[in-house]
Amino acid sequence: DKVLSPTPVRGLSSYGLHHITSGLEGLTTKMAAMLLDAGADPTLLDATGKSALHYAAIGGFIGFSKALLNAGADPNVVEDTHGQTPLHVCGTHGQPRLAKLFVENGADPSIRDSYNHSFIDFAQAPGSALDEAAIAGLFKMPKIKRKEVPRRDVTAWLGEGEWSSEQLGRPYSESRCDLDVLDGRTLSAHTLLQDYVMMNRPVVIRHLADHDHLLNVTSAAYARSNLLREFSDMEVHVSDIPYNNKFGSSNGMDTTLKEYVQTMGNHSLLGGKYPWYIFKGHPVPFRSDKPDSLVSMERVPIPKLMHDTFNGMANRVDGKMRGGRREEEEIVAEEEEDFPLVDGRGGSPRTPFVNLQFAIGSKGTGAPVHFHNTAWNFLVYGQKHWYILPPSRNLMGKRQVLDWVENEVEGLKEEGYALLECTQHRGDIIIVPEMWGHAVLNVQDSIAVATEVKGNNYRGVIPAAFKMLNTRNKADHKRSPLPNDVKAGPPHGKSLGMFPSSHREPLNPNGGPNKRTPRHREKKVAEIPPPWDMDRGRHGP
């Protein structure tokens, strides 16, 4: 209660990382001073090569970072997973003030990570987590002009599927987009992975859907008469926000799909001015791939570009990337196959994904501000407007989206939240990276499918290093069993090196050492005493 005030800021209903960071700023600064005074070494690294400055950059802790820098922390230390310095982390998470502090203390903005990106690239890229006003004010750097491929009126040749095209009206019907809008017909998985997914920045892809027949197939499957012919009696849950029971809203009820569609047609949806929505999840593959699923393989073929891109991301986690990045020829070779083998055993085009979701709602419905893993959203019918926030300013709320837009967006802007906005048109795919806050408002009656991606790239988690506890020998283990997830280690007195260190160098586009990136210095690795030396009565810290 002392960290987060029970009363929302200026009456706003949503909370996020910024509120937590603000509440903990003083405490973390004091904690840093205590640890450093007690002899803590600010240059130590964890098992992934991250320093305390990397973690400070994730959270945006200014005072904590100043204390570390004053004690000798290196702002140019390169971690192992992505070849990134703390300054790069400011770029992926959206921490411009902290980035300025690092640069003032010797951080080199020209160092390139494993994907050949410098902090300058993050600062100037359209739609990056570093907002334009902050970058212009702090670094005097302009944003690069964003890309936008023109859209086509697909309704002229596919029809409206018997759905209403009536709009909410201004300002919601005014089309705008602060993100790059790319041509999916010429976009490669390599470019999408390197320059957007691994830069942790959202993007819109246009014309991919009709090029891969996704739009044709879904338009037929979700035309009003076809949808009701197949699923009119299906029981669905309608609510003011998706998964309302999970998030503490009592505004929801069960009905049939036919009854909901009928209320859409006669404008009698529950919720009145702030209407309710259907958002149905289908875990992959247990529910998504059943023949009677709303999102079966026949109804929602996965675009090959989506599979190849996110399978490439998964392969990085599986150790199938060299030095943190896959070479372009590997990904191009995969693109020439129908669908590459997954984890060596073969698999479904849906293997890289977790939960395939079906959403249908009238104008004024949608999803409240929230965040999660990387996800892509494909709009089959209608029009949506997105409100997007970088990880450092993400929010989680449970206020119906139109209510939130009408009553909170301006207040957030006054609080300093720089929202990116983008209108999604029929046939567009929008990718929202992990940890980015986003709210989605249906400007027209809309049908969409979406899915989250397995795993994550940059989300702050407790490092595996801190779970790798030295344990007793077998005799001690028998006398005092350890938790199931802790493996037995060497006998007492023979402590393992708990924080193994990799000395991989980031690669340049030609595969050799990146001469602009300093070589790893000999890393100091933390040595934690066995837990029984800390406290005879416990098995861990």
Image (spheres, helix red, strand yellow):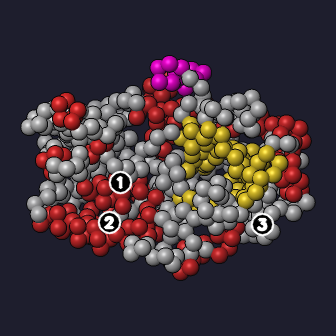
The reply, left or right, for residue 244 in relation to residue 33 is right
The quadrant of the picture occupied by the N terminus is bottom left
Question: Would residue 211 appear left or right of 51 to someone viewing this image?
Answer: right
The answer to whether 124 appears left or right of 212 in the picture is left
Number of residue marks: 3
**What residue is at 86 percent from the left and 43 percent from the top?**
232
Predominant SS along the magenta part:
loop
Contact, mark 3 vs mark 2 (Cβ under 8 Å):
no
Residue 409 image position (x, y, % from top left): 60, 72
Residue to which mark 2 is pinned: 61
Q: Looking at the picture, how far across and down is residue 64, in whole percent?
A: 26, 66
Q: What residue type is labelled 2?
A: Phe
Numbered label attached to residue 89: 1
Is residue 240 among what the camera can see? yes
Chain part drawn in magenta: 334-346
Is residue 345 shown in magenta?
A: yes
Across and down, in percent, residue 345 comes to 50, 19
Local secondary structure at mark 3: loop
Residue 126 in view in this figure: no
Q: Nearer the viewer, residue 330 or 147?
A: 330
The reply to whether dot 1 and dot 2 touch (C-beta < 8 Å) is no
| Residue 485 found in image quarter | top left
Regarding mark 1 in the picture, which secondary structure is present there? helix
| Residue 159 horizontal/vertical position (percent) | 86, 44
- The reply to whether callout 1 and callout 3 are in contact (CB within 8 Å) is no
Query: Which residue was labeled with disc 3?
Result: 271
Residue extending furthest left?
A: 493
